[in-house]
Amino acid sequence: MENNQDTLQRFIFESSPVRGNLVHLGLTLQMALNKQNLPSGLRQSLGELMAASALLAATLKMNGSMVLQIQSKGTLKLLVVECTSDDDAPLRMRATAKWSGEIDEQQHLFDLISQGQFIITLDPKDGNQAYQGIVPLEGDSIATVLENYMLRSEQIDTRIWLCCDGNTAAGMLLQKLPETMNQTTVEHDADIWNRVGHLANTIQDEELLHLPAETLLTRLFHEEQVRLFAASNTQFFCSCSRDSVASMLRMLGDEELQSILAEQGQIEVNCDFCNTHYAFDKVDATQLLMTPVAAPSQPNVH
């Protein structure tokens, strides 16, 4: 049986500090990518980052939004994925990329990056302080960048496997929790982290992309005691609106808006994520400027 669902599933290795997540993105990925005209290489990379974002969002169990960004001063300017979680609702996702110049289909993602940074932003819905972590890119793949970030910034051993064929993206995450986070484990197999990591390294892209979660885990870890939890769903969703675009335009100020109107006759904005078109004429612009700009909240930066 082939996995053709958009699902996110948690699993644990019984009596051990090791946990994991599996994600499979079909329609979610296609709706995100097909609204943009991306080179094939960036479709694959953005798909991998979407899968990685879903895996990390599942470990956080946070109501609110999480944004992962790769920023660069090279040909690639930006890869960004936003995930929004809300209790038992499907994980809502959107993604986009920015680049300059031509991109050869054979070029590796990291050939397009210069002075790259990895940025994670968390904005909890419960009123807690927003958080932003910014680190240099360390690694030669999206998976290794995230593994290095989790180890150095969060002190959590993490292994990640990602793949995307341009239409489907999938991923698996394993984490070794600190002992203090796993108080129910009195005695456990001290070698399990190394063992399951070695077994997981045998996974093939075709298996990750197409096998159902239960079949995949049985094939990889058939001698381990693995408990698989019920699946949750993912979906593409863009939160842009005329009001949110208007708020962004207000921040440009009167002089900038009047300059655009004088030159173009109206202000036009296309959403980078869903390609929705918004237009504001002179009457609209006047109303914009009559509304005060709300000061954005500032995240804690680490």
Image (cartoon, rainbow, N blue to C red):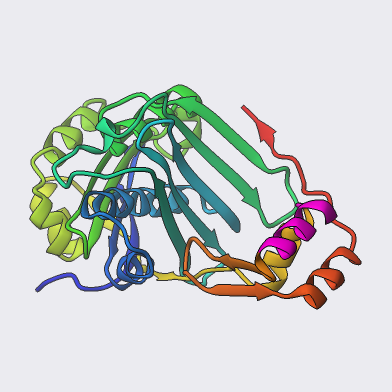
Q: Is residue 213 left or right of residue 143?
A: left
Name the residue nearer the viewer: 93 or 11.
93
Residue at 41 percent of width and 28 percent of height: 116
Q: Is residue 83 left or right of residue 241?
A: left
Q: Can you give x and y, in whole percent of width and height, for residue 276 in the image? A: 52, 73
Whether residue 188 appears in this view of the structure is yes
Quarter of image, res 280? bottom right
Q: Is residue 191 above or below residue 108?
A: above
Residue at 68 percent of width and 43 percent of height: 130
Name the residue nearer the viewer: 107 or 53.
107
Name the residue nearer the viewer: 31 or 20.
31
- Boundaries of the magenta span: 252-263
Q: Can you give x and y, in whole percent of width and height, for residue 183 in the image? A: 48, 36
Residue at 86 percent of width and 72 percent of height: 287
Q: Is residue 129 above or below residue 271?
A: above
Quarter of image, res 37? bottom left
